[in-house]
Image: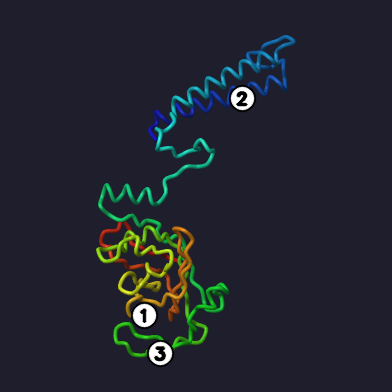
Amino acid sequence: MSPVTLFFESLLFIFVSGSLLLFVLGFISPDKSLFWLKGKRTRIRSAIIYATAFIAGMFLVNLWYPAPPAGKKTGLGSSGKMHMKTDAQIAKEVFEETGKYYTKGLIKSSTVYTYDSLPEDIRKLAPEPDRLTKDAYTGTNSAAIPERKGYYVRLVLDNNLLAKASSSETYRESDLLRETDPRALYGPNRNSFSLYDTANTEIRHTEKHMGFNLFYVRRDYNIDTICIGPCPEKPAKVRINCYQQAQTTDPIEYTF
C-alpha cells in the first residue's frame, strides 16, 4: 500500500470515527456537544449533523472501494452467502492460461496413526502392522514390522483435481471418477504413494506399484478420504506420484 493511499484511508477513518465520537458526546454532555450547540434541541441537531457526516463518510468509502464487477464477486452475494472461486474454477482458469494442472492444496489434510489409534471404522480394514512386508524392488520378504509399531497415513483430498492430473489417453477423467468404483482413481500404474522420513529420504515401499497398500477409500462428492499403510517408520511427509505430475503446478505432497 502506497503512503498516499494509507494517508487518505487514515483520514477517512478519523473523519467517520470522529463524527461518531462527537455524536456520543452530544448525548452524554449536551453543553459540550457538537460545535457547542446550545438549546433544548441540542441532541437532535447533533444527531442530524452526525448522520450527515456518517453518510458522507460511507459515500467516500463506496467511491474508494467500488463493488467488484459482476461475475467476479468475492464478498457477500445476493443470497447473503460468501461467494468464492472453487478449486474447479481455478483449475480451469489455470489450465487455459498455462496448460498445467492445478494441484495446489489438492491434499486438504493428512494424519499419521499407529494401528491402535486408527479410527475404528478404518482399523477394521487395516492390515496388521506385524505382517511381513514386501520389498518393492526385489520382491523378497523383508523383516517384519514390530507388532503394533506400524504407521498408517490418512489423507483427505480433492478427487477432481487428482483425476485431472492422473488422466491420460487410456484413462479419461470420467473413467477415474466412476461413482461405482471409487478405487478406480487409485489403481496400480496410475498413482503411487511415497512416504519420507525427517531427512527427506524415501521410506521403503510395501507395494510394488502403489508404493504403500491402500486399504480404505471413502468418497463424499469431490472429497476422498483414503488410508495407506502400514509403514515401518513414522513418516514426515507423504507424496502422491501421478501420471501428469510433470505438468502440475505444485507437487502433490503434504508435510506433517
Instruction: From the top left corner, tell me how far across and down residue 45 is, in percent.
Output: 66, 13
- Give me the C-alpha separation between circle 1 and circle 2: 68 Å
- Give me the C-alpha separation between circle 3 and circle 2: 75 Å
Q: Residue at x 38, y 58 (%)?
A: 160
Labels 3 and 2 touching (C-beta < 8 A) = no
Of labels 1 and 3, earlier in sequence is 3
Q: Which residue is mark 2?
A: 20
Instruction: Say what amino acid the circle numbered 3 marks.
Output: Ala
**For the C terminus, which image quadrant?**
bottom left
Mark 1 vs mark 3, foreground winner is 1
> Is residue 3 shown above or below 93?
above
State the image quarter where residue 105 is shown. bottom left
Mark 1 vs mark 2, foreground winner is 1
Q: Badge 2 local density, few (<14 within 10 Å), some, or many (20+)?
A: some
Q: Residue at x 48, y 23 (%)?
A: 60
Mark 3 vs mark 2, foreground winner is 3
Q: Badge 1 local density, few (<14 within 10 Å), some, or many (20+)?
A: many
Q: Which residue is mark 1?
A: 207
Q: Which residue is mark 3?
A: 143
Q: In the drawing, what numbered circle is on residue 44?
A: none
Apparent side of residue 254 relative to residue 250 in the rendered image (left or right): right
Instruction: Say what amino acid the circle numbered 1 marks.
Output: Glu
State the image quarter where residue 102 is shown. bottom left
